[in-house]
Image: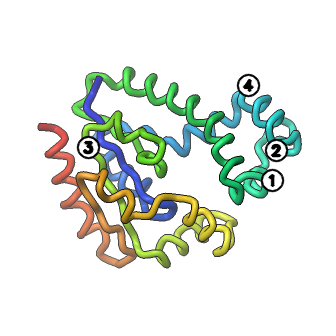
Amino acid sequence: MAKCLGITGGIGAGKTTISKIFQTLDIPVFDADAEAKACYQDTDTIAEISATFGHDIFINDVLQPKVLASKVFAFKDKLKRLESIIHPRVHDRWIEFAFKHDEQPYIIRENAILIPSGGHLTCNKVLLITAPLEDRINRVMARSRLTREGILERINHQWSEEKMLPYCHFVIENKQTPTILDAILPKVIEIDQHMRK
């Protein structure tokens, strides 16, 4: 199996932005969030979630995110139950992805909950993406319909940057500035060279 670089960070930190830079270097990226969303389209997943949380979670087999969020994200026990349904399915997709790209110099596993889920144990190195809180909130508000309060609620349910830091080998601070790419690119290239050794 190819070497793996884990990329993690809180919501709105800029994980996907950094991952796309690695993709320009021809490094395959496994986006755990995108794969989780794809799982919600599987018939067996729809059936299990509906049976667990209610049949209004899906309308004509289409996920209703606001309904799911209202029933799950404010309750730790229900969130853990949802994770117990989704995480094994995402993990199966990860294993398939890793074997598919076995001959690459390395691959990337991007996941906001990489460390609390234990996914970092499958990675040779872990890169933490950090960003100021207001930058994170503004980014998420620009790309979604979440309110500031809703974003803060999700941030509070995630591990803090400080808690994740001891598990990480590299850190990139992703501040929202006009010259951010000038600051990030050299760090990405440095990490890429390290992973290719």
* SS under mark 2: loop
Q: CA distance from mark 4 to mark 1?
A: 19 Å
Give the image location of residue 14, x and y in percent.
Answer: 43, 61
Residue designated by label 1: 67
Furthest residue toward left: 197
Residue located at (82% from left, 41% from top): 58
Pointers 1 and 2 in contact (CB under 8 A)? yes
Secondary structure beneath dot 1 equals: helix
In the rendered structure, which disc, 1 or 2, sits on the residue that comes first in sequence? Answer: 2
Between the C-alphas of marks 3 and 2, the distance is 37 Å
Marks 1/2: CA–CA distance: 6 Å
Q: Which residue is mark 3?
A: 125
Question: Label 4 neighbourhood size at 10 Å, few (<14), some (14-19), many (20+)?
Answer: few
What residue is disc 2 on?
57
Q: Is residue 134 above or below residue 69?
A: below
Between the C-alphas of marks 3 and 4, the distance is: 34 Å
Q: Which residue is mark 4?
A: 44
| Residue 69: x %, y % from top left | 73, 55
Circle 2: residue type: Ile
- Report the Cα–Cα distance between label 1 and label 3: 37 Å
Give the secondary structure at mark 3. Answer: strand
Q: Are marks 4 and 2 in contact (CB under 8 Å)?
A: no
Cβ atoms under marks 1 and 3 closer than 8 Å: no
Which residue type carries mark 4? Asp
Find out whether the residues at labels 3 and 4 contact each other: C-beta distance under 8 Å: no
Of 74 and 91, which appears nearest the observer? 74
Whichever of labels 4 and 2 marks the residue nearer the N terminus, that label is: 4
Q: Is residue 43 left or right of residue 155?
A: right
The location of residue 191, given as percent across then percent down, is: 20, 50
